[in-house]
Image (cartoon, grey):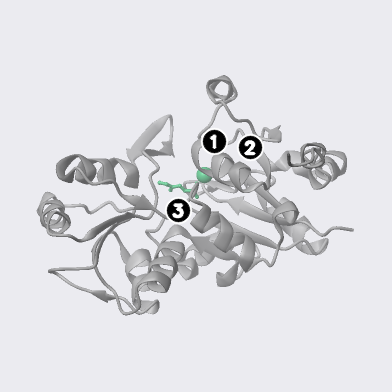
Amino acid sequence: MNQKGFLIDMDGVIYRGSETIPGAVEFINNLRKQGFPFLFLTNNSQRTNRDVSYKLRKLGFHVEDDDVFTCGMATARYLASRTPQATAYVIGEGGLLAELHAAGFSIVDDHPDYVIIGEGRTIMLESVDKAINMIMNGAKLIATNLDPNCPVGNGKYRAGCGAFVAMVECATGKQAFSVGKPSPVMMRMARKKLGLSTDQAVMIGDTMGTDILGAGSMGFTTVLTLSGVTKAEDLNHFSYQPDFVISSVKDLLNPELFEKVLHNKKELVEEIPFP
Ligand SMILES: O=C(CO)COP(=O)(O)O
Ligand SMILES: [Mg+2]
């Protein structure tokens, strides 16, 4: 059988803030038991994959550092592959800084190759002004991701990385290049990390504009879970759709539905010969 592998978004899919989504631990245990490869993919660059896997273990998941892939990792690795020994001015937190250092970057305070903006709760207008002047002087503007906001529970939201990036874009007139989901850069890196071909990759996500758009454009099977950002009533507003919609990953404990996802009917589309 054509072995499938799972790319699994984090916030809104396996946890919400600091709470495990019911059924998520069992779902991951099942994947392991059945030998399906999987990788967690998050558009949050605040923490390193070690920090995130520690949090997951506290929530009851049996995972290792290497099971987690963040947009901070994708950003650092991608940029380092384009510009060896590059310099960066960073508006972001420890997860992003650690990855940039590990990829060979020097973090500098003037004339950087890149201004990189990631998720963070400590942004200061002084550093935004500094970044704007660097970009005006030729530094390239990079975003780890463009999520405009992030739900924090009780129907409340916090500003996401995309909101801060928009401020810098507006001030400079320069558009950021974003590496996180839905960018094919992060989607492809994740698929390659699991050693999957396009038609072996299944993405489970809670956000249409990142998880489903990115994975769907790559040709992966897409499963939208309604346990996070996108609600059932939002689906009508999108001109692209996921292959499957579930209420939470708990639904995938049902062997019949799981089998359906494994044998996505998308294959019908692929049978149409290219003209
Ligand atoms: O925190 C996020 C963006 O602010 C999104 O996290 P996930 O990609 O894990 O859903
Ligand atoms: Mg999510």
Looking at the picture, tell me which residue is in the foreground, 253 or 194: 194
Report helix, strand or loop for mark 2: strand
| Residue at figure coordinates x 35%, y 52% from the top left | 177
Residue count near mark 1 (Cα–Cα under 10 Å), binned few <14, some 14–19, many ≥20:
many
Q: Give the quarter of the figure containing the C terminus.
A: top right
What secondary structure is marked by label 3?
A: loop
Label 2 Cα crowd, 10 Å radius (few <14 / some 14-19 / many 20+): many
Dots 2, 1 in contact, CB < 8 A: yes
Whether residue 21 appears in this view of the structure is no
Query: Is the shortest distance between ligand 2 and the CB of mark 2 under 8 Å?
Result: no
Residue at the disc numbered 1 = 208
Q: Alpha-carbon neighbours of circle 3 within 10 Å: few (<14), some, or many (≥20)? A: many
Q: Is mark 3 within 8 Å of ligand 1?
A: yes
> What residue would you read off at disc 3?
180
Identify the mark nearer the N-term, 2 or 3.
3
3D distance between C-alphas at marks 3 and 1: 14 Å
On residue 133, which mark appears? Answer: none
Alpha carbon distance from label 2 to label 1: 7 Å
- Of the pair 157 and 113, the residue shown nearer to us: 113
Q: In the figure, residue 103 lies in which quadrant?
A: bottom left
